[in-house]
Image: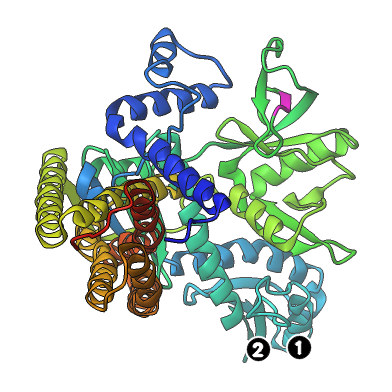
Amino acid sequence: MTPTATWKRILILLVILWGCLWALPNAFYSRVETRNDAVDAIARADGVATPEQEADTGLWPSWLPSGLMPLGLDLRGGAHLLARVEVTDVYKARMDALWPEARDVLRGLRDQVGTVRRAPSPPDTLRITLANPDGVSAAVTALRALATPVMSLTGAGSTDISVTSDGADVVVTLTDAEKAASDSRTVQQSLEIIRNRVDQAGTREPTILRQGADRILIQVPGIGSAAELKSLIGTTAKLSFHPVVSTTTDAGASAGARNLLLPSMDQKGLYYIVEETPVVTGEELVDSQPSFDQNGRPAVSFRFDGAGARKFGDYTANNIGKLFAIVLDNQVISAPQIQSHIPGGSGIITGSFTVEESTQLAVLLRAGALPAKMEFLEERTIGPELGADSIRAGQTAAVIGAIAVIAYMVLSYGMFGWFANIALVLNIVLMIAVLSAIGATLTLPGIAGIVLTMGMAVDANVLIFERIREELRAGLSPARACEAGFARAFSAIMDANITALLTGFIMYWIGSGPVRGFAVTFTLGIITSMFTAIYVTRLVIEVYLNRKRPKTIVV
């Protein structure tokens, strides 16, 4: 056979070596997992480790890869929840928060509208009855000034409220564009709060995804029960606003009496020393929304209730030019500078934000509590014993499948069957390595994909070997027959695997849950099997022929 170019040989060997190294940690799963958990815990503690954690970090060499295939809910056990966010709850909160502002605006028109009162109305509507119906037109004009642009791509050019008249009443409603944007923000905010709660609990590889318009899928492996998970995500975050004393890069700096040393959420290595007693707390925050400043740059607006507004206004009046830290769960998410007295409890945070960053900051500011009720539509608890049974069943299926394929190849193709089996083993190793490297979660359907791939992995070798047999029957020498076999079987192999790849991509694209888990391993298996069947098997056969130089071969 024509020798493979040296650079190709080196590349093939490097890929195999990489695969073996990255797959190795999975052979010592418990030890590596314990070590990784200890490293993560030390990192969260800013490098401070307990003796037990120090001991755990020595369970696996730091110079070796430590990535593992995350095990899915059906393999590790845990809790599954499907929740629906009651997005309409937010409409009422918006109207309740708008009423004091509308009342203050109309007080300035008392001579035209007389006294005003809030009339009963649906959750997304604010109905205001005027004592003097003749002032309705002036009231509508004044209240329309409260409208702000909708911060969304679909709502570009729209305002958040619509103001109309109905007899002696002024009717303020949320526009459809604002409702759509509000629904999206509410679900996204709930998603962020749930993710923060679950991540802080130290759980492994949670799956928290938005499904549809108002639903959230929550799967947390390793947690005791669905009830425990529901309790965890219902925990209220602690949001507060503190005066900043100073900043430092020393994690061990002394904060001083009645002060706190808190890390910055965005800037690694930066710490704020803030006063222990907050000026206002998240319980007094009514709302925060992405907006634009007077120069049209993205910003974040916020508003406090009556008590919070008074405290916030007094503090800003007396501390112009000072930093004011916004603290969420003992981390400083922002520390804007007070530019002027901010009366009325409303303010704006400016900076070098993009629209996405201002939206994210607004979400974090509102992340003190879930913005709306959540109805749990589905909940399941999968015990670790069931997960262990699934793993054993998957291992058994994999072993039986591997033995059957190995035996078939040896019985059918003799020594060349052993060459194909070497490629098969390396194919499984490479699959595990890739799954570990990309952090793809292994599920029970994923194991089924691996077992199926073992059977499909030798298809390319079967095509090659049958083609070699035909070339031998045509009278070619062993070396030339093998060369021709690989060359002429290549197109058929590519056609078969490309159609299979397309099937895998479609399953991943339109599927969800178990279907995606199967599609991931199925697709990766096809890619790795093409590499091992075409390149690894060829290299093994080439080495054999060039060293032994047999006069005849049996395929």
Quadrant of the frame with the N terminus: bottom left
Q: Position of residue 45 (x, y in %)?
A: 53, 22
Name the residue beneath numbered marker 2: 165
Question: Foreground residue, 214 or 5?
Answer: 5
294 with respect to 97 (left or right): right
**Residue drawn at 46 percent across, 45 percent down:** 13
Label 2 sits on a secondary structure element that is strand
Tell me the kind of residue under disc 1.
Answer: Ser
Q: Position of residue 151 (x, y in %)?
A: 68, 70
1 with respect to 126 (left or right): left
**Residue drawn at 9 percent across, 51 percent down:** 400
**Residue drawn at 43 percent across, 73 percent down:** 213
Magenta residues (range): 269-273
Label 1 sits on a secondary structure element that is helix
Q: Which mark is residue 137?
A: 1
Magenta stretch: helix, strand or loop mostly: strand
Look at the numbered discs 1 and 2 and tell me whether their residues touch, using CB distance below 8 Å.
Answer: yes
Tell me the kind of residue under disc 2.
Answer: Ser
Q: Position of residue 322 (x, y in %)?
A: 86, 33
Question: Foreground residue, 265 or 376?
Answer: 265
Count of all numbered marks drawn on residues in the image? 2
Does 316 appear above or below 512?
above
Does 516 appear above or below 367?
below
Q: CA distance from mark 1 to mark 2?
A: 8 Å
